[in-house]
Amino acid sequence: MRRIGFVLVLVALLAAACSSDDKKTTSSSGRTTVKVSVDNKAAFAASFLAYFPNEVKVHPGDAVQFASVFTGEPHTVTLGTLANDGLEAAEPQMQNPDFDPSSIPQLAAIPSMFADDPNADLNQSAAQPCFLATGNPPGPGETPCPKAVQPEFNGKQSVFSSGFLPNGEVFDVKLSKDIAPGTYRYFCEVHSIGMQGKITVVPAGDTVPTEAENKAAADAELQRTVSALQPGVDASKTAPPDKAEAGVVSEEAQEASGNVFGPATASIPVNGSVTWTFLGAHTISFNPPEDAKVFIAKAPDGAVHLNPKSFMPAGGGVEKPQPPGGEGPPGESSSTTSGPSTTTGATTTTGGAPPPPTEIDGGSYGGTGYYSTGVYDSFPPDLFSYTLKFTKAGTYSYVCLIHTGMEGTVKVG
């Protein structure tokens, strides 16, 4: 099954993580709003392909407010009968490593945000908001859904989607008072079935969780994932330069990645080398110009565009090898589960060594100019390592152009 990778973003940081937010408020109109964070933050740079809390219980006429916590991952919140029926049909296959979500007709009808052609721009029907009472959204390409004022969600719309949620943007889903009690599933059009949640609507007289209970559920979900990543993050701090890491993943937290370079500072002699093993989807980029630091952005007309200068190699960087016929957009691989931080097989975090990585010789770098590997998505069993030789003494900082706060340093000489 193809994995929709973390392809990618660098817009700007959002406010606070859900652990510090109130989770439910009541307006003067009597409508109760439950807050859900899209992605999250930890003490170390990380991405979480999840909604916090990922299940909420509300009454008809209430609202669910989804707030983007930007970590470098693009996300959507996509509801509707196509999403709900498709996710229900996919549920029995979630643990099947050979399952392809596109085999479910309802999910196949909703395009991913990223095009199959690595040289194409985003699919606008997924990248822009989409509200359809019936029918399927436009297929892949430049055509967005018809412009429409966002209605209340009644559970009957075929598509009800936020589109790309950048830089702290919120998506308020106001439920109609006549919405039928039941469970309404939603997912991310970037990360497919690997990132999904549920809204359960109960009759007006039924009890729903309190603000404190919602907050506790969100915090517990976050802490479980952070605890699974923490050992790998700690171990990466002492990695030698010839076994450096670009990212941390864990079998126990397949919906997340630690966006760290390990070690944070690598010290080598002149003409020495650093070899990074990519774990996740990242770039290694020295001296990026300002116009390479925004990976994906909304235009004034509402269209959402990728920035090729961010994800393509530069300054002699070696592009990730592609299988015959190509592999799809940057960050997409043929791994066995959906979602950029989803892994299969053994990882450096949870015992057992990953398969030997494919070795890439990145050549040499003299410390000046923009040098970037471009995007490498690297998940077991298809791992990649990247070696770069440094020919001049100095201290060189580098970043990942996908993930906010992912940075490292190489000291030479």
Image (cartoon, helix red, strand yellow):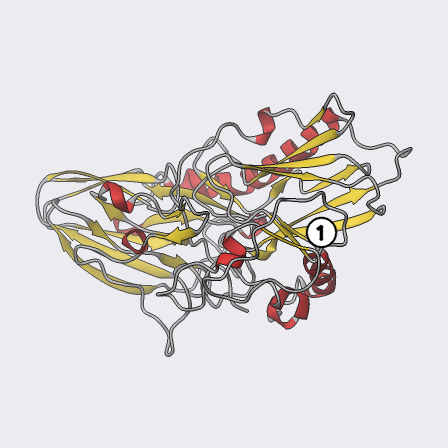
Identify which residue is drawn at 46% across, 36% down: 167
- In the rendered image, residue 224, in percent from the top left (x then y), is placed at 61, 39
What is the three-letter code of the residue carrying label 1? Arg
The answer to which quarter of the image holds residue 116 is bottom left
Q: Quadrant of the C terminus?
A: top left
The answer to which quarter of the image holds residue 13 is top left
- In the rendered image, residue 186, in percent from the top left (x then y), is placed at 67, 51
* Outermost top residue: 28
- In the rendered image, residue 292, in percent from the top left (x then y), is placed at 27, 46
Q: Is residue 42 visible?
A: yes
Figure disc tally: 1
Q: Quadrant of the N terminus?
A: bottom right
* Outermost bottom residue: 324
| In this view, 268 is above or below 381 | above
The foreground one among 335 and 347 is 335
Identify which residue is drawn at 38% across, 64% down: 120
* Residue that mark 1 sits on: 185
The foreground one among 62 and 149 is 149
Identify which residue is drawn at 70% across, 60% down: 134
Number of other residues with Cα within 10 Å of mark 1, as a class: few under 14, some 14 to 19, many 20 or more: many
